Image: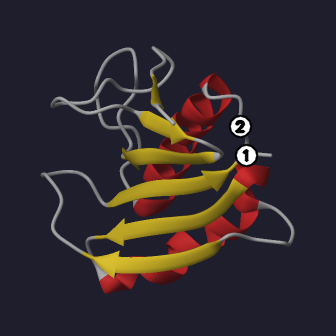
Amino acid sequence: MGKTAFSTRNAPQPPAKFSQAVRKGNILQVAGQVAFDPASGAVVGEDVAGQTRQAFKNIEAILTEAGASWADAVMVRVYLTDTGHFAPFNEVYDELIGDAPQPARTTVYVGLPAGLLVEIDVLAVLD
């Protein structure tokens, strides 16, 4: 069974040689997305809430390109730069992710390039 890569201009292009998303069988992995505007490459949002909204937009564009949606997400990994961002991130996440069943989630604290506060990747299973 082969792999299929997905790419859309409606999300930022990867800065290195990797795909925005890859599907094998019914498994779709969306690469980590940050708050870059796909057209300008500029960071969108000065706080974790604004950056989370843009990362979600980027992920949604990739999911759509791959024939998926947030309803197909079974795992979300969140990378935050500061433990103080956990509560405001959760407020926006809960608003955007919608009602149950919500995907499983892991939150990790990491360093990201200057100006970036959050990165999110998604694992989806398609029917």
Q: Nearer the viewer, residue 85 or 34?
A: 34
Give the image location of residue 94, x and y in percent: 71, 69
Please tell me which residue is depicted at 33% across the width and 71% down the height of the picture.
Answer: 80
Q: Nearer the viewer, residue 68 or 127?
A: 127
N-term-proximal mark, 2 vs 1: 2
The correct choice, above or below, for 8 with respect to 122 in the image is above
Q: Are marks 2 and 1 in contact (CB under 8 Å)?
A: yes
The local crowd at label 1, few if under 14, some if 14 to 19, many if 20 or more residues have their Cα within 10 Å, is some
Residue 75, quarter of the rendered image:
bottom right
Using the image, tell me which numbered label, if any, was put on residue 68: 2
Using the image, tell me which numbered label, if any, was put on residue 126: 1
Give the image location of residue 47, x and y in percent: 39, 58
The amino acid marked with disc number 2 is Ala
Please tell me which residue is depicted at 71% across the width and 37% down the height of the picture.
Answer: 68
Please tell me which residue is depicted at 47% across the width and 45% down the height of the picture.
Answer: 30
> In the drawing, does residue 10 fall left or right of residue 43?
right
